[in-house]
C-alpha cells in the first residue's frame, strides 16, 4: 500500500483550519486506498475467516472516511457549500430536471433548493423552472 508521509504537512506552528482541512483530505485519501486494498483482498480469497475480518476492517475505514469528510465540512466552509450544492444537483439530476436547472444551483439567481416538479406526468417548461 502506498505510504503517505505522516509529517508531510507539519508546520512549525499550529495549523489553521484551512491547513488542517488539507491534511484531513490526505487522511481521506489513505482511508480510500485502504478500502480499495481490502476490497481487492476480499475478491482474491475464498477464506471465509479472512473475508469476515477484511469486511469488518473495510467498514471501519468507510466510517473513518465519512467522519473525516464531515470534519472537512466544518473546517472548510467553501467545501461545505460545494457539498450542499452537489447534493442539490444530485437530487435534480436523478429526478430528471433539465441541465439548465442543475447548472443554476449555486449561481446568482439560482435557488439553493430548486422546486421543480418532475413527476412522470408533468413536463418541464420554462414557467415551472422559474420558481
Image (spheres, rainbow, N blue to C red):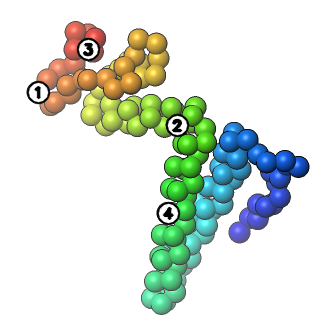
Residue 61 position within the rendered picture, expressed as x and y whole percent measured from the top left: 55, 66
- Is residue 54 in view? yes
Q: Residue at x 61, y 67 (%)?
A: 34
Q: Which mark is residue 63?
A: 4
In this view, the residue in front, 44 or 94, is 94
In this view, the residue in front, 70 or 16, is 16
Q: CA distance from mark 3 to mark 4?
A: 38 Å
Q: Secondary structure at mark 3?
A: loop
Q: Secondary structure at mark 2?
A: helix
Judged left or right of residue 111, residue 56 is right
Q: Secondary structure at mark 1?
A: loop
Residue 9 position within the rendered picture, expressed as x and y whole percent measured from the top left: 80, 51
Dot in front, 1 or 3: 3
Labels 3 & 4 near each other (Cβ < 8 A):
no
Q: CA distance from mark 1 to mark 4?
A: 40 Å
Q: Which residue is mark 3?
A: 131
Q: CA distance from mark 4 to mark 2?
A: 19 Å
Q: Is residue 2 above or below residue 26?
A: below
Labels 2 & 3 near each other (Cβ < 8 A):
no
Labels 1 & 3 near each other (Cβ < 8 A):
no
Q: Which mark is residue 80?
A: 2
Q: Which residue is mark 1?
A: 121
Q: Residue at x 56, y 76 (%)?
A: 41
**Does label 3 or label 4 sit earlier along the sequence?**
4
Q: CA distance from mark 2 to mark 3?
A: 25 Å
Counting the numbered discs, the total is 4
Amino acid at each position: 500500500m502506498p505510504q503517505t508521509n505522516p509529517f508531510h504537512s507539519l508546520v512549525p506552528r499550529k495549523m489553521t483550519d484551512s491547513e488542517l482541512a488539507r491534511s484531513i483530505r490526505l487522511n481521506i485519501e489513505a482511508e480510500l486506498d485502504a478500502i480499495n486494498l481490502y476490497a481487492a483482498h476480499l475478491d482474491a480469497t475464498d477464506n471465509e475467516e479472512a473475508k469476515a475480518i477484511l469486511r469488518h476492517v473495510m467498514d471501519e475505514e468507510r466510517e473513518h472516511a465519512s467522519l473525516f469528510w464531515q470534519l472537512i465540512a466544518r473546517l472548510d466552509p467553501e467545501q461545505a457549500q460545494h457539498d450542499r450544492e452537489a447534493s442539490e444537483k444530485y437530487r435534480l439530476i436523478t429526478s430528471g430536471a433539465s441541465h439548465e436547472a442543475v447548472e443554476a444551483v449555486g449561481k446568482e439567481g439560482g435557488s439553493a433548493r430548486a422546486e421543480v416538479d418532475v413527476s412522470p406526468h408533468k413536463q418541464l417548461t420554462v414557467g415551472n423552472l422559474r420558481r
